[in-house]
Image (spheres, rainbow, N blue to C red):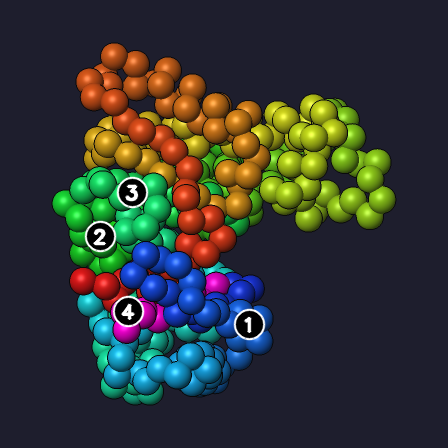
Amino acid sequence: MTSVFCGIDIGGTKCSVALVDEQGRIVDKILTREHTGRQEAELVALVVSLVHELLQRNNLRESQLPGIGIGFAGHIRYRDGVVITTSNLQGFQGYPLREAFQEHFTVPVILDNDTNAQAWGEYRFGAGRGYDDMVFLTISTGIGAGIIIGGRLYRGTTGTAGEFGHTIVAPGSDLVCTCGNRGCLMAVASGLALPRLFEKKTEAGKKSRLSGLPGFDPGKVDGRILKKGLDMEDPVSREIILDCGYYMGIGLYNIFQALNPPLIVLGGGLIHWGDLYLDKIRSTFYSLAGNMLYDPIKITVSEIIGEAGVTGAAALTMK
Ligand SMILES: [Zn+2]
């Protein structure tokens, strides 16, 4: 029979457990939201039971897997599998998550940050096929990157390489990041920043067509609502999307100068803003890079949208 791989994606709102084939296709999957609000050990026990359920209903034994790959939404110290921080789930700081999972399995457990897992999935099965070096950038509630150099994930000393969301692109900004610094890319261009960006526009006297929508809450502005605004030709939505694209363009320029990759892949929810947004990212990037760009750099979007987390987690167990 063909090989099958198991991936677990533990996010702030959703947790997926899936079996994936050698081509990165989902064979079977269980999605739960029951993992939130649980103690660490309870969450682990729940996820382990889902893995067992998935194996059982596919007539598989754990020993047929090369390992269990886990992507977790937080900073992971890769060498010992300890969670350093997570802003998406309660608790977990300093928690030995890999060890906690390993106690339940005989095959090796590989734990990494969810963005690294996604980057690896993109490299193996998506837009990164055929490249040795690439940077994958996820732009959703937060912003993060996975860096692949010479066909390997580059994790840095601690395991937190690729935290591009905390690179500073607007030091004079009054927008404060979750890390406490001002003008981080995440503070000016992520999903988390959108309610504040909207508020700033309306404070400056700009009128949004979204305000007339029934049940509209400016405190809950997200990527989806702004996409709707764009479709409604709302000038404020358009401006925010262009501003976010501008700062992302600066972010990509910084990545280019630091790493000179041949490929940057963009993933995450905000890429659904489409061409207006992506064109702004590219045009900002190219205007900054100018004649320093000797070789072409491909800036493209993820090819495994939606299942990237769990597919990437499974890919962590592949040779
Ligand atoms: Zn920050």
Q: Is residue 166 visible?
A: no
* Left or right: residue 253 compared with residue 260: right
Q: Earlier in the sequence, mark 1 or mark 3?
A: 1
Using the rendered view, name the quadrant where residue 22 is placed: bottom left
Gap between marks 1 and 3 measured at Cα: 29 Å
Tell me, yes or no, whether the highlighted magenta stretch contains residue 236.
no
310 lies above or below 215: below
Gap between marks 4 and 2 measured at Cα: 26 Å
At label 3, the amino acid type is Gly
Residue topped by disc 1: 32
Q: Secondary structure at mark 3?
A: loop
Callouts 2 and 1 close, C-beta under 8 Å: no
Q: Residues within 10 Å of mark 1 (few under 14, many from 20)?
A: some
Q: Secondary structure at mark 1?
A: strand
Q: Earlier in the sequence, mark 2 or mark 1?
A: 1
Q: Position of residue 158 (x, y in %)?
A: 22, 59
| Front residue (pair 82, 115) | 115
Q: Marks 1 and 3: which is nearer the front?
A: 3
- Residue in the image at 70% along x and 47% along y: 219
Residue topped by disc 2: 153
| Front residue (pair 294, 54) | 54
